[in-house]
């Protein structure tokens, strides 16, 4: 069987590196990567080809490729996007739009639905205040689709664009033979934590930053209050969820957008675990009002019943297993503590 042709944009980011490694481990894929940056050592040699540069300008290059699957991970995350809103819109929306158009074109022209896997986010939600957030608790995909950030607006809109190109583009009349459309599938991720890489530009970054700092014996001033609560997930579970969604038969999917959840904890619960694991940890709090406001608008937890039922999603790591079986052993190896 010939290898499946896969494009991974944003390959140098946290999800990108972990995904490329997992696809290479699985085998059966010809991986083409794209990013602003050259490939880091962690994935150099795993990609058949790397296209470096701005996706919006490089898109023409990709019209010559016969991709079966596109993982469009390139994005400007929530904190960074608030500082440079127009640039974030260009990266997050225009980049996605260009790739969706390419996938739609190829799907129709060659009669083969290109799978388009899109990481969306808990940032697609927006709660008006803490009282509402606490009262809401666990939210479903359709609840509170009123994002407060540029990044959240971009993600929510790109979910809609994906559905548009996947279902309605061309507006064929019911009597006409329907064209082959691209196969758009989105996952709304919670905050992700890797033991190998650190995020940059996000607002859930206090979780991973705190843990990596503690493991290195570095001081860390957390930019949100101790009681701040959102949902988090181990990076291997994030990769697992994307591959499960990729593999799910189209007939089993009742939606184009799925929440996935693993564990919802407060910043102080992170701190407690970090302090227990690393004697030299020194974690204090210095809340940044703007970043606090962003996290306060995100739900405490998300309901992933739809993913569990449609494609049998189940995370491997709850909070205990995350620390004991993934993060601590890996991070101790990494920093030698
Ligand atoms: N982790 C992302 C951020 O903080 C949310 O998807 O921006």
Image (spheres, helix red, strand yellow):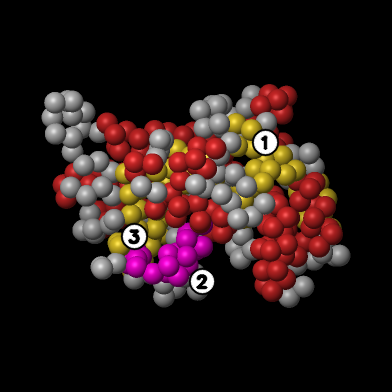
Q: Magenta span covers which residues?
A: 15-32
Q: Quadrant of the N terminus?
A: bottom left
Earlier residue among tags 1 and 3: 3
Residue 300 image label? 1
Earlier residue among tags 2 and 3: 3
The x, y position of residue 302, in whole percent, is: 60, 37
Mark 2 vs mark 1: in front: 1
Q: Is residue 194 left or right of residue 106?
A: right
Which residue is depicted at the point 64% across and 55% down? 317
Instruction: Sort mark 1 into few (<14), some (14-19) or many (20+) by Cα contacts within 10 Å.
Output: many
185 or 217, which is in the foreground? 185
Dot 3 corresponds to which residue?
6
Which residue is depicted at the point 40% across and 35% down? 254
Q: Is the magenta stretch mostly helix, strand or loop?
A: helix
Q: Is residue 18 magenta?
A: yes
Q: Quadrant of the C terminus?
A: bottom right
């Amino acid at each position: 069987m010939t290898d499946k042709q896969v494009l991974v944009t944003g390959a140098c980011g946290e999800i990108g590196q972990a995904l490329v490694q997992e696809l290479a481990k699985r085998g059966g894929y010809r991986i083409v990567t794209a990013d602003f940056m050259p490939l880091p050592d962690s994935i150099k040699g795993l990609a058949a080809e790397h296209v470096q540069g701005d996706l919006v300008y490089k898109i023409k290059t990709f019209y010559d490729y016969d991709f079966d699957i596109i993982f469009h991970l390139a994005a400007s995350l929530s904190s960074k996007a608030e500082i440079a809103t127009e640039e974030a819109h260009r990266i997050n929306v225009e980049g996605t739009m260009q790739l969706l158009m390419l996938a739609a074109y190829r799907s129709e022209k060659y009669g083969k639905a290109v799978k388009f896997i899109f990481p969306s986010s808990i940032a697609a939600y927006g709660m008006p205040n803490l009282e509402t957030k606490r009262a809401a608790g666990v939210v479903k995909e359709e609840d509170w689709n009123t994002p407060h950030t540029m990044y959240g607006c971009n993600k929510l809109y790109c979910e809609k664009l994906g559905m548009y190109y996947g279902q309605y583009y061309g507006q064929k009349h019911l009597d006409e033979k329907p064209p082959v459309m691209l196969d758009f599938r989105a996952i709304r991720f919670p905050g992700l934590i890797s033991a190998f890489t650190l995020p940059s530009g996000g607002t859930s970054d206090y979780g991973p930053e705190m843990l990596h700092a503690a493991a290195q014996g570095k001081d860390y001033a957390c930019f949100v209050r101790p009681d701040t609560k959102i949902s988090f997930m181990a990076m291997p579970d994030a990769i697992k969820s994307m591959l499960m969604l990729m593999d799910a038969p189209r007939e089993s999917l009742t939606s184009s957008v799925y929440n996935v959840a693993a564990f919802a904890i407060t910043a102080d619960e992170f701190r407690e675990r970090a302090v227990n694991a690393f004697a030299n940890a020194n974690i204090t709090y210095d809340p940044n009002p703007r970043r606090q406001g962003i996290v306060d608008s995100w739900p405490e937890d998300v309901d992933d019943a739809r993913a569990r039922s449609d494609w049998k999603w189940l995370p491997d790591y709850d909070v205990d297993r995350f620390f004991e079986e993934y993060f601590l052993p890996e991070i101790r190896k990494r920093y030698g503590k």
